[in-house]
Amino acid sequence: MHMEEPCFNFLRTKQTLGYHVYPTCRNTSGILGFSVTVTTQATKNNSELVDKKIEEFLLYFEGRMRLLTEKAFRTQVSALIHIKECEDSCLGEEVDRNWNEIMTQQYLFDRLAHEVEALQSLTKSDLVDWFQAHRGKERKALSIHVVGFGEQEGDSGVQQSVLSEIYQLTFLPPSSYMKNTSYIRDIRNFTLMLNLLPYHKILK
């Protein structure tokens, strides 16, 4: 929530990298993380350049958090608490939330109340320390680039049904922007070398 507006302002308004720019919190089998997504035109911006600009934004955002006043921090925390305390707008929201607890076998049906309790005790230093810990030299980050090619979307003369298209994945060589990164050429072989983390249940 705190990252949404500055993310859009930095990457969309100032850098004009694309219309779809947003940060996302992730919970993958109990492993928490966050991502920044930028959908841009392949004919306008190089994906490696976009990746570099995302890194610049995260550096800028860290400085922004340091300058955040305690009053502004408490205002944002209070707004998030208010959102979590709001009643469901329809029965479907409650069903989806509780069904997710059942599907993941966690059964923490009062999860929102626990999150509110945690937010009430959260401090600005907690937030800054957490961000620095996950942005330092020991951080783990994965940058995914998907680049289209061929006929541009909306071009005239493209009559063939998309159902008959055969898609092929072609790995592109890294550019000079990515010289300090580890380039993954074989996804399956790379994942086989990784440690398999057990499914983690967030119960408190």
Image (cartoon, grey):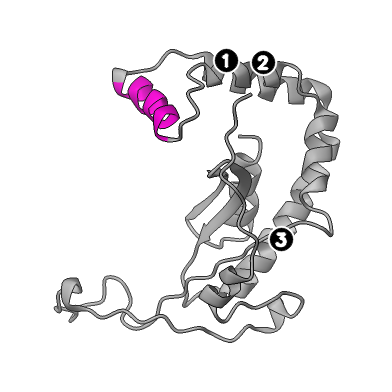
* Residue 65 in sight here: no
- Please say if 2 is above or below 150: above
* In-image side of 127 versus 113 (left or right): right
Which residue appears farthest toward the bottom when viewing the image?
173
> Compared with residue 82, is residue 39 higher up or lower down, i.e. above or below?
below
Q: Does label 1 or label 3 sit earlier along the sequence?
A: 3
Left or right, 106 with reference to 61: left
How many residues crowd around disc 2 within 10 Å: few (fewer than 14), some, or many (20 or more)?
few
Question: Is 17 above or below relative to 199?
Answer: below
Circle 2 or circle 3, nearest the eye: 2
On the image, which quarter does residue 91 sit in? top left
Residue displayed at 33% across by 76% down: 152
Residue type highlighted by circle 2: Glu
Q: Which mark identifies residue 117?
A: 2
In terms of sequence position, does the residue under pointer 2 or pointer 3 come before the other?
3
**Residue 100 lies in the magenta-colored region:** yes
Tag 1 residue: 113
Question: What is the CA distance from the residue labelled 2 to the residue labelled 3?
Answer: 32 Å
Check disc 3 and report the residue beneath it. 55
Image quadrant where residue 186 sits: bottom right
How far is mark 1 from mark 2, CA to CA? Answer: 6 Å
The kind of secondary structure element at disc 1 is: helix
Quarter of the picture containing the C terminus is top right
Question: Main structural element of the magenta stretch: helix, strand or loop?
Answer: helix
Of helix, strand and loop, which one carries label 2?
A: helix
Tell me the amino acid under the disc marked 3: Glu
The CA distance from mark 1 to mark 3 is: 34 Å
